[in-house]
Image (tube, rainbow, N blue to C red):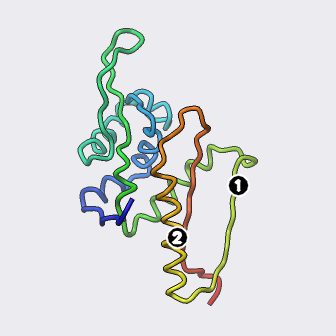
């Protein structure tokens, strides 16, 4: 995927909402505003504001209009993948909050976690980060298989406050 660019102030503000980040996750497949609202357990009127903000900043793209079950005009929205191409310094806490919100919806028996403590010199730590990012980029670039089960990965690297 190449180098990430630093998000603009407008992009950072758009991504500073746990609800908007959840909407992006929901819209990995085309979803109407009503479907988005149901998926995030919110009122369609309130999600529409967030959907429009994500469209205006290029994180969601409106898809061709379709007719709903009662003939109503529906606009599906699809995540563009733009957020994966951005570096958002300081956004870690929002990402963690979104992760915690989503994990709360998963049965504990379905949650597979790992944790690792390391002591590496700066050059090796940089190599470790680069290799992890390359692995994530490699899998992010693969097309979704509509018949495969969906998975989520959350990875956090931070200084260990428990070990001086």
Q: Position of residue 61 (x, y in %)?
A: 30, 38
* Residue occupied by mark 1: 112
Q: Residues within 10 Å of mark 2 (few under 14, many from 20)?
A: few
The quadrant the C terminus occupies is bottom right
Query: What residue is pinned by disc 2?
Result: 131
The residue at 59%/46% (across/down) is 151
Residues under numbered marks 1 and 2 in contact, where contact means CB atoms less than 8 Å apart: no
Q: Judge depth for marks 1 and 2 and give the one in front.
A: 2
Decide: is 126 above or below 41.
Answer: below
Q: Position of residue 74 (x, y in %)?
A: 33, 21
Q: Residue furthest top?
A: 70
Identify the residue shown where x is 60% and y is 37%.
148
Q: Of helix, strand and loop, which one carries label 2?
A: helix
Eyeballing the image, is 163 above or below 80?
Answer: below
Q: Secondary structure beneath disc 1?
A: loop
Q: Is residue 74 above or below residue 15?
A: above
């Amino acid at each position: 995927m190449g180098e990430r660019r630093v998000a603009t102030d407008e992009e950072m503000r758009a991504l500073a909402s746990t609800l908007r980040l959840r909407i992006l996750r929901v819209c990995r497949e085309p979803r109407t505003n009503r479907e988005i609202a149901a998926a995030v357990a919110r009122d369609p009127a309130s999600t529409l504001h967030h959907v429009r903000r994500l469209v205006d900043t290029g994180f969601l793209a409106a898809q061709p209009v379709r007719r709903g079950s009662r003939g109503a005009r529906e606009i599906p929205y699809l995540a563009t993948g733009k957020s994966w191409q951005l570096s958002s310094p300081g956004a870690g806490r929002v990402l963690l909050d979104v992760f915690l919100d989503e994990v709360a919806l998963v049965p504990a028996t379905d949650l597979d976690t790992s944790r690792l403590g390391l002591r590496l010199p700066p050059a090796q730590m940089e190599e470790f980060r680069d290799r992890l990012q390359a692995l994530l980029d490699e899998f992010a670039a693969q097309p979704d298989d509509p018949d495969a089960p969906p998975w989520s990965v959350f990875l956090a690297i931070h200084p260990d406050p428990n070990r001086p």
